[in-house]
Each structure stands twice: as structure tokens, then as C-alpha cells.
Image (cartoon, coloured by chain):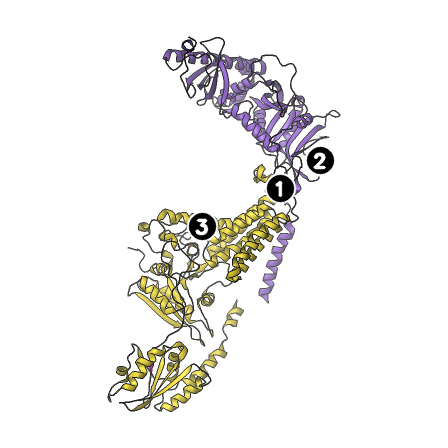
Amino acid sequence: MSKLRTTGKIFIIILLVFILSGCMDQTEVDQLAYVVAIGLGKSEEDDNLVKITYIFANPESGTQAGGSGGDEPPQETISFSATDFITSRSLANAVIAKQVTYDLLRLIIVSEDFAKDEDFIRWIYDATKAMEIRRDIRLLVSQEEPSVFVQNNQPKLDTRPHQYFELMFNRGLNTGTVPPSKLNRFFRITEADANLFLSIYATTELNDDTKENKDPDNIAAGEFEFEGETNNTQFAGSAVFKEGIMIDTLTIEETRLAFLLSNVLQQPDEILTSLPDPFTDEHYLTVRIRRESNVDLKMNLDKTKPSILATIPISIEVMTNHGMTDFTDSEKIRQTLEKSFEDTLTEKFDELIKKTQEKYSTEPFGWSLVARKEFLTIPEWESFDWMKTYPNMEIHTDVRVDLEKFGRQTELPSLDEMRD
Amino acid sequence: MFNIIQKMKPKTRTQHGNKMGKKKLAQDVNPNLQKNLDTLKVVYSYPDNTDFLIRELFISGLNKKAAILFISTITDFKLIDEHIIAPLLNNKDENIPIHNIITIQSIENKHTIQDTMKDINSGNAALFIEGEKQAYSVNVANFEGRGIENPENETVVKGPKESFNEKAFTNISLIRKRLKNENLVIENSVVSQRSNNVVYTLYIKDITSEKLLENVRERLNTLDVDAIQNLSLLEQYIEERKYSLFPTVLYTERPDRAVSFLEDGYIVLLMDNSPDSIVLPATFWSFFHTSEDHYLRFMYGNFTRLLRIFALFITIFTSSIYISVVTFHIEMIPPDLLLAIAASREKVPFPAVIEVLLMEVAFELIREAGLRVPSPIGPTIGIVGALILGQAAVEANIVSPIVVIVVALSGLSSFAVGDISMNFTIRILRFGFILAASVFGIYGMTAVFTLGLFYMISLKSFGVPYLSPLTPKYKSSGDTVFRRVLQHETFRPGYVKPKDITKR
């Protein structure tokens, strides 16, 4: 009898656990609306409101599973004003049928207008409060309002939004056209208060005032001219944030140079660009640029005359040769070539560094992290004040070019003999 | 607790009944032949009992009446005819002992009627002779049974393909064939009162621990039941925790496996009517291993072990991981997969738990029913069950396709653990994990897993910890998840306390 009673008690206790715990966290995957991107823009009516834009992924699009999804569109978008993007979750339910979740959130789109507002930082820090928002999502600055950006952004082939953005960013990182722009890095740099943060810069609208015959590398989003039938969205170049406020944009070339100067940013796989041919005036050489190892930074940070010597080891593969000079034959020709590349690159690096010193008064390369190690205590570092001292620093770059292959077939026919 | 012990104790009725029987039959063999015959005729309900036969004859030479009693269905007719009846009838000698007339290997003298009966029951012929105060029990037993066949549950690709059959003597012979050693001892003991079932205890005298042996003997001798037909039933009488989910007695149908355990100092039990043997004690690893692990070369054997441990975890965890990830930890899933799952679940009316349980139960049903289906229609049912049910359930939006994959994977993997008892264990465990996952997600699964480990460590089989030699640590050849190269397996498992721990 007593045995029965104990069993009964144990059973009831177990039952209580089930009842009281109540599956509180439980949510079924099919009852959620997955937000892939949040857009933040200035609200026209009130300073205390922001215009929230959501891109919802439609799980049923593009799946071949049994009982297919029919012709439902791949995404759903909605824009409205709210006090922040946490309360907007429940507000959205006035229109959206399912519970809004940020589990699948991949990026936050901010309008250039809003990013340049000094109040922007107040809203973006909401992302640190929400449980579901991961720190590895990306920050994107769009020239236009996010609501417009989202409406215009209609990818034709990779229609599923999360996939489209993921592919776009990965490709951009591989070619060095856009910076990584992770939210976590934004917070870190803003709080460290020494560097610039580079964010992805994008637009869906073409700039009309594009100058003719511009160097194809020296453009930012909106300046790339193309024809054909595809999505109008361009991801190119970066938006520069200083102390949580956007101050400027960088072109593709500048973004790439920043990649090459930085030990913090992950290096792109292939930077394909063209550099002047030292042997002919009218032709360019297409090269693939890779940095061989980390930039070697020699810092001398005494208060009076701080200086930095950056040694940048670069390996270059020559892909085309329109001047048809034979590089393989003579050691001397190769040395001239190397020298020419070094000069061109040094010039470009110096130009960018000068721009950061004069225009931004700090750098986006993460050099302050290296500089910190030169100081014994944090107060010493703080009194050094990187942002104040950087503009006056004497910075030298030393580019060491290492030539690699000259394409698959190195030899080219001699033009003189052929045209004979 | 005491209640249970007391409940088990009072068996006075049967003991009393036996005493009565003994009193009646424990009488000496009477010199008067007719009296003996009368007694036995009553006992065996002669002539109602049709296969009990009495052949009366006159031994010429000795000039004595005699009678041969036997049960025709369990004796060899030809032997009786040629080696008992014929020599007796043809005898011319006047002064010759019966032992010298009968030409059969084994003859014993029995002085009581009861002993004689026991022998008749086990297939001997009893020879009563007028004027003699003893009966001759001649071994002519011939029980019908099948021959040695291939193992059905523990099949191997490489290695011997003999299995035990229902005759204990054949089984002992199969073991002796592999272990030609005078130290192999075969003890027998009667474990049931009414059916007189005999259990053969096999061990190697100079290896097996005396204490372990005593433990087994004691458990066999304290059994107090009318009948234990075979080892499957005996297993349940001698195991320690009868309600436990985990088996603690290993059951194998392979003589080679039994022998390898004997050589390591384990004890093997055999019985008539069981095409198997019982190996004592058993650890978790003995259920996890198969004999082929050692027959295959080092790399191949360990590869199958790796697959098996993998399959074990897949069986236990896939369904529950699916449930917990889909209901509690959505952020763990890669976006593409998450959207695919969400899309396929969109039209399913049930929550993930019900969905999975539905398919798991369906799978178990197919499995159980498939076992009972008569073999000619087996394949048809298989197709209906697997193909139609799975396909149709998905198309009818009752379950999502991914659940079919999850359940099929876990169901299929469960077959990788060959031992039938362990197989049931993990199949039932799976449901425990599913429930835990549906209530608490991964957290619940971890809790159940931890509790399960605690329980497994607390288990003992005949005094041997269940997870040894892994934990607690014992000196052994380290044959647990993986095995070593044969030359490095130099120790017998320390946990069975063998008298000689090194193998040479």
C-alpha cells in the first residue's frame, strides 16, 4: 500500500513538472514570420519615431516539398512608423498573420539620412537588447529610404531574400568591393572610440551625375553603369562611421585599399584591378592583388613626433598584357615592372591615408589596436588620444611587391614580326 | 521491500506436495518383478499413456524373466532392439552379469523406483530382472530436434556460421569443439521441481572466479518453480533488476561467441530447448559488440564499431533533436533548412511532437507487424507499410517529409545494434527522449541523458558494474567502443576477477 502511495506521489510530481513548466518557450516553426532584414529610416512626423521596414522571407517559395507552395512570392515587405524595432514586432501583427521573429535576421538597413543623424546610435543600440538578434548580422547603409530600397530590390534569380543578401555579401567580401560590416564590430569600434567603422554601402537608384569615363574601380554604389534586365540594387563601396555617425563614403578602390592596409579585416580572395603598364602609355595591365601576410607596423608613438612605418607585402599576378612586352625574358624588365607597381600602390595608399588623416582624423584599418600594445596601461593609452594624434602622425608606407605568374601562357607573339 | 520477500517465501504448498510424492515413490526396487511393474504401470497410467511401452521377455541362459520399460518417443528403437533385446534373448551363458550381455556404452544400476523413473523420463530404458534388487538404466535416449543451422539473429559475413540448436548436448559439443581443454567443466543442476529442467553451467576451472561461480550456483539453486522451459525464461528468473530497461544477461546463439566469453573467465549457461546460451555477467559493451568485430581486421572491425556507436546515438537522439530544435531552438538551424522545415510544416495540422510520435509509432507498428506476417506476404506488407504509408502520409499533409526522413533514419539505425535486448532498450529510450525534448528542448534531453548515465553506472550484473571497464576502470584489454590489435589484447577483463588475468 505504501509502495503504491510513493509511486503515486512521484507520478504526481512528474506530472506537476509537465504542467507547471508549460512549454513556455515552445514555438512551432510554421507559426513564425521570419524577418530577414529590418530597415531603419527617419520618420517624417516625429523625432521620436523611426520608420521600420521589414522583409519577411516566405518559407514556401522555391521549395519542392510535397504539397508545393504554389505561386506565392518569395518575400513580403511592410513599412510603418514605430518607436523602435522591438515594439514594432507586435505592431506588425496588425498586418502580418504570424508571430514576428528575428531568428533569421540577416541585416539591418539604415538610410543614409538616418545614419548621418546623431540620434542614430540611440536606435541601433536596441539591437543589443533583443535576445534574438545576433551580433553577426550586417549593417547596410542605403542611399535612399529603406522602404524604397526594399521595394526596388527585386532580384530576378536568387529570389529568396536571405539567400540573395548572403550571396551578395559573400561575393562582395571575396572581391573586396564591400566591407564585412558586422554589427558586433560596429559596437566595438564605436565603444573603443578610436577607429572608423566601414559599413556596406548600397543603393537601388542610379546616380544621374555620374561622370563619363570614370575609372571603373573608383566608384561607389549608384555609380556603376550597366545595361540589361536585372535587379537595380548595387552593393559597392563603404559608408564611413565615426563615433556612431556616418560621415562619408568610400569608393570600391578605397575599400579595397583599406582591406589591404588592415590586419583586422579578413582579406578578400581576389582583388582584380588594372594598373598602368610602365612600358607603354596607352595600355593597362590587369592584375590580381593579394596580400601575402599581415601588414608589418612599426610604431614610434612618443607624444611629440609620432610616426608609423607600414610594410605591406603584396603579391601580384599579371593576368593580361596588352602592351605585349615579354616579361619573362629579362630580370631587368621584371624589376622595372615591380618598381612601377610598388610606386603606383604606394601612391594610392598614401593618398588614402592622407584622406583619413585630413578628412576623418582617424583610420578604418584597425591600427589603433596595434598601437594599444605600445602602451603599458590603459590610462596612458587614453591620454595619448589616438583620434587627436593620428592626423599629425608621420606615416610611411613601404609596399613590397612580389610578382607571381604571368597568366597561364607566359609567352606572347612578337607583334613586330607578325605585322611584318 | 520486506513485503516482497515475504511474499516470495511461502512456497510450502509445493514443497509439501513434493514430500508426499517422494514418500510414495522413494521405494526400493522390489525383487518381485511383477510388483515393480505394477507400481510403474500405475505411475505412468499404462496403457492409457500410449508411448510408454513395456517389453517383457525371458532371458535364456540365466533363466530369468525380465521387462524393459521405456518411452518410445524419446528413445532409439533400433538401439533397444539390437543392443538390449537381441543379446538378452540370444544369451546362452548361465553365469554372466547383465553388464556383459548388453552392448551399450552406458549402463547404470538404480536401486530406487524414483531414480529409475527419472531416467526413463529422460529417455533411458529401464531393465528390471526377476529376483534382482536393482534396475538397469540403459542410455538409449533419442530426442528429436533440428540439426545445426546458421545463426539467424547474429549473422556474420566473415567467420563461423554455426549456431546453437535446441539440444544441450549438441551445444556442449559445439563448445568442446572450440575449446579442447580438460579444464572446461560442465556442471548440471535441476532447476525446476516438476518438469526437471536441467541447466548446464559451463566454465573454465582455472580461470573463472570462484566467487562468481558461487553466486551463479546459488541463484540457480534457490530457484523454486515448477518449470523453466528454456533459457529465455531462466534469464528472467536470475537477473537482478526485473523492471530495469537495460538487459543484464547476455543471450547469444553463437557458440564461437560463447567460447570467447568462456576463455575470458565468464560463465555460460546452456539448457535443452534453447537454441542459445546465456553469458554471465554481462556489461553494456557485450551487448554493443558482435563477434564479427574481432573476425574482421583491425581497421574494418573498428570501422563497424564506429558506425554502430554512431547508429546508436542517431537512434536515440535524431527524433528528439528534431523536435527540440524545431520547437525551442530555431536559431540553431541554418536559414535555408529552417525555411525548408517551416515550409513543409506549414500545412501539417499537428505540432512537431505529435507528428514525430505518429511516425515513430507507425514505424514500430510496421516493425512489429512485419515480424508476425506470414513470410509469403511479407514483402507486400513491407511495400505497403514503408512506401504507401510514408508517401501517402506526406501527400495528405499529415506529416512533413523531413519527419519521414528523421524517423526512417532513426528506425533504420536502430537495427545496427544487433542484440535484441539492447535493441529494445534503445527503441524505448528514444520515446523518453522525445518526451523530454518536447517539454524542455535540448535542456530536457541533456537532463534525461545525465540521469540515464547515472542509472547505467548504478547497474550491476552479477556483481560487475555495467559500464566497466570504462567506468569504473579495471585492468582489461580495453575492448569498449573500439578494440585493439589482437596482439595487444593481453588481459582478461579484470571485472570478472579471473584467476589468471594475462592471456598468452
The chain letter for the residue carrying disc 3 is: B
Magenta stretch?
A: B134-143
Mark 2 is on which residue type? Ala
10 Å neighbourhood of mark 3: few (<14), some, or many (≥20)?
many
Q: Which chain is depicted purple?
A: A
Structural distance between the alpha carbons of marks 3 and 1: 32 Å
Asked whether B87 or B399 is in front, the reply is B87
Q: Quadrant of the C terminus of chain B?
A: bottom left
Residue B140 colored in magenta in the image:
yes
Q: Is residue A372 visible?
A: yes
Judging by the rendered image, the residue that carries numbered circle 3 is: B308
Residue A24 falls left or right of residue B50: right
Residue A409 falls left or right of residue A94: left
Up the image or down, A13 lies above or below A200; here it is: below
The chain letter for the residue carrying disc 1 is: B
Judging by the rendered image, the residue that carries numbered circle 1 is: B342
- Element class at badge 2: helix
Asked whether A41 or B475 is in front, the reply is A41
